[in-house]
């Protein structure tokens, strides 16, 4: 965008207030820049340190304890950029401001920090830091820690979008001793890879978040630690491992510092809006997702890895009784990763297609489980299956991602990786998708174990950067999604980053998010809230198998025995289950549909289908970590549906619950799970004394 005019300011002793400039006021004093929007004040020191404050109700609040300078390491040494005489350039940028702060180190390295603020996003400061070798000798760039913040010692909660460890909590209370590397981007040791590049922190009064707005999965860390004194530290940590020749530059992606009110939902909504403002398009928004993405679903994983057509077909009468119109053929139906042909021992001959046809005759759609970009090779692997060589890897060895040593680089499940940056690999997945959807008749996908992939050093691929493979992962998911949608517009495509947040590379190319193997009820609720923040308040979010709301490990086996439907229904998620019926085999004991469970499942599925709160508007009226009981609100058809949770399904709560966000009129409160009137309340904010175990779900309607 063309600048209307610019102003140069020299000298750290100068002080100026640029009141003549329209829009956001900017001032410079002693080399520090102060920017003020309608919602925030940002102070940026010559060192690059940022202090962010929230302006609200005539008050200024900040979580920053002080200014934390950038750290650049070159050749094992920290580079100092003198604070004296920085050059500040201020430009009008549409309805915002663009500011440059320039400085130069003694070794000839030039630093340019670019800041952007826009009134349409008044709580957001955008920034990049670029380094240019202005000297005569090569300069190594080892590490850059930027956008650093040391927070005040507070009662603080945090959301970490990194995808590191299966089952790790994304939402945590900060306590002394906490340390999280928060690695994102490429798969590397100690991380699954992928993730959402956001770390958000909030107290009762305000929040602060940092991250980046690149649509590609940049490889970095957002390390966060809490010292013994209780003060949290956070930074964006880049490891370029580059050497700049004279005239060459290194730049960070566009980063952000955000202040907000609320919790991680509000931070993720602002992040998503900023991304969409830059062209991000999401298939899982309510505007793009098909109606079928909101229907309840049953998954065959209750029968584990050796499921047969007979077991899959035997469940159909019960699905029809429960009015379930989606089923999933889950893991290990296939012979070899990468080739994706039916197993001869469990799905012989044409039995797989015959099974799909029978589901269709009974009015039920079927999804297929598979793992894009994976290719099998010989040897025992971590899931206990003795792998063999896949046909695709043998016939196309040049398609493989290689590591620095020229060896096949491994992704999830210790599988070889096909490089998504290659057009022929993308075409392979276009043809595979056509086989699954058009030829076999499946109605969608459960893409599982999809975290990220390793960098590619295969010289035959002629990549500009090893990161090209990581960046191109989303291209294959786009091919799968678009090919599927063209063949069946109602098709549902899930992507499951087991036990972790999603990868922004492929997040745009699913039309039903999934809570991804939650470990208990609390994770179900918090991940539904995460996806509603990222994808929109009416987006379809599959709560995964209800059996996962309670689980434990027994003799190296996971036992899933949960029945907490309320955690999905009450938060606006899509209900799912993996019950086994009418089998009696002991290995299915935890998920067998007993007569008692049968009645409970029938009740909750009827509630879900009658209310369809997944199609309502998620309203973030309660503060995660601070409100007890834990509260959620869904608005639909002129009514507000509140859900309150004591914690786990067996915990109890006795005391007041607060109904927020109402009009100043009288309302009726009805417990729609148990069919009982709870009384009348008066808006806009009302309190009711209650007592419940696990959860309380109510419908609040005008009288």
Image (cartoon, rainbow, N blue to C red):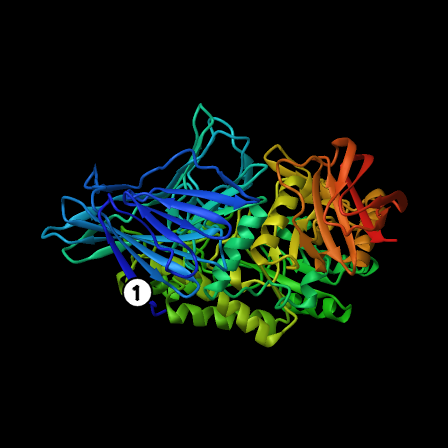
For image coordinates 63% across by 73% down, the residue present is 489
Which residue lies under the disc numbered 1? 461
For image coordinates 54% across by 59% down, the residue present is 335
Give the camera-side residue of 443 and 499.
Answer: 499
Can residue 698 be seen in this snapshot?
A: yes
Give the camera-side residue of 68 and 625.
Answer: 68
For image coordinates 35% across by 37% down, the residue present is 68
What count of labels does the image hold?
A: 1
Placement of the N terminus among the 4 image quadrants: bottom left
Q: Quadrant of residue 644?
A: top right
Please, what secondary structure does the residue beneath circle 1 have?
Answer: helix
In the image, taking residue 75 as reference, residue 428 lies left or right, namely: right
Residue 145, given in percent of the width and then of the height, sits at: 32, 42
- The answer to whether residue 254 is above or below residue 624 is below
Residue 322, given in percent of the width and then of the height, sits at: 81, 57
| Category of crowding for the residue at label 1, using alpha-carbon neighbours closer than 10 angstroms: few (below 14), some (14–19), many (at least 20) | some
Residue 287, given in percent of the width and then of the height, sits at: 63, 68
Residue 173, given in percent of the width and then of the height, sits at: 55, 33
């Amino acid at each position: 965008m063309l600048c209307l005019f610019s102003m140069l300011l020299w000298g750290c002793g100068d002080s100026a207030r640029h009141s003549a400039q329209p829009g956001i006021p900017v001032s410079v004093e002693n080399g520090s820049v102060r920017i003020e929007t309608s919602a925030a004040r940002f102070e940026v020191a010559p060192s690059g340190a940022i202090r962010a404050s929230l302006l609200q109700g005539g008050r200024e609040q900040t979580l920053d304890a002080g200014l934390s300078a950038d750290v650049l390491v070159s050749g094992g040494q920290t580079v100092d950029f003198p604070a004296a005489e920085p050059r500040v350039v201020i430009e009008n940028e549409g309805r915002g401001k663009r500011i440059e702060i320039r400085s130069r180190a003694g070794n000839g390295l030039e630093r340019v920090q670019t800041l952007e603020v826009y009134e349409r996003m008044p709580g957001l400061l955008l920034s990049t830091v670029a380094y240019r070798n202005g000297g005569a000798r090569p300069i190594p760039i080892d590490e850059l820690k930027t956008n650093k913040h040391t927070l005040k010692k507070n009662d603080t909660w945090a959301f970490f979008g990194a995808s590191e460890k299966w089952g790790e909590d994304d939402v945590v209370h900060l306590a002394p001793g906490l340390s999280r590397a928060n690695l994102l981007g490429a798969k590397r040791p100690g991380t699954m890879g992928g993730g959402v590049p956001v770390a958000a922190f909030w107290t009762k009064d305000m929040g602060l978040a940092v991250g980046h707005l690149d649509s590609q999965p940049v490889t970095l860390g957002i390390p966060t630690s809490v010292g013994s004194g209780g003060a949290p530290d956070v930074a964006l940590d880049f490891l370029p491992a580059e050497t700049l020749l004279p005239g060459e530059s290194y730049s960070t992606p566009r980063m952000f510092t955000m202040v907000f009110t609320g919790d991680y939902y509000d931070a993720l909504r602002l992040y998503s809006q900023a991304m969409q403002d830059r062209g991000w398009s999401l298939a899982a928004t309510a505007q793009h997702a098909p109606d079928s993405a909101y229907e309840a679903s049953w998954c065959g994983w209750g029968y584990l890895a050796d499921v047969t057509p007979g077991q899959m077909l035997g469940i159909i009468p019960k699905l029809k009784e429960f009015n379930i119109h989606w089923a999933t053929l889950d893991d290990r139906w296939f012979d070899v990763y990468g080739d994706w042909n039916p197993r001869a021992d469990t799905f012989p001959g044409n039995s797989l297609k015959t099974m799909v046809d029978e589901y269709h005759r009974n009015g039920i759609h079927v999804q297929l489980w598979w793992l894009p970009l994976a290719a099998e090779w010989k040897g025992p692997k971590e899931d206990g299956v003795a792998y063999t060589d896949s046909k695709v890897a043998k016939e196309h060895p040049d398609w493989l991602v290689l590591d620095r040593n020229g060896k096949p680089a491994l992704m999830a499940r210790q599988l070889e990786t096909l490089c998504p940056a290659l057009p022929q690999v993308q075409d392979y997945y276009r043809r595979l998708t056509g086989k699954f959807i058009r030829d076999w008749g499946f109605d969608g996908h459960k893409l599982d174990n999809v975290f990220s992939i390793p960098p590619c050093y295969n010289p035959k691929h002629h990549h500009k950067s090893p990161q090209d493979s990581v960046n191109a992962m989303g291209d294959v998911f786009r091919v799968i999604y678009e090919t599927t949608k063209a063949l069946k517009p109602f098709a549902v495509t899930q992507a499951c980053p087991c036990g972790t947040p999603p990868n922004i590379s492929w997040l745009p190319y699913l039309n039903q998010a999934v809570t991804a193997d939650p470990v208990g009820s609390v994770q179900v609720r918090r991940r539904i809230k995460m996806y509603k923040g990222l994808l929109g308040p009416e987006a379809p979010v599959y709560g995964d198998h209800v059996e996962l709301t309670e689980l434990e490990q027994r003799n190296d086996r996971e036992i899933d025995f949960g029945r907490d439907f309320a955690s999905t229904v009450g938060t606006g998620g899509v209900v799912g289950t993996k019950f086994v019926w009418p089998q009696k085999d002991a290995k299915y004991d935890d998920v067998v549909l007993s007569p008692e469970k049968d009645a409970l499942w029938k009740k909750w599925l009827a509630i879900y289908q009658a209310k369809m709160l997944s199609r309502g508007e998620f309203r973030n009226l309660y503060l995660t970590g601070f409100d007890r009981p834990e509260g959620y609100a869904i608005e639909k058809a002129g009514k507000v549906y509140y859900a309150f949770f004591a914690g786990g399904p067996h915990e109890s709560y006795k005391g007041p619950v607060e109904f927020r966000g109402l009009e100043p009129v009288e309302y009726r409160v009805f417990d729609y799970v148990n069919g009982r009137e709870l009384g009348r309340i008066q808006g806009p904010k009302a309190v009711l004394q209650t007592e419940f175990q696990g959860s309380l779900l109510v419908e609040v309607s005008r009288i």
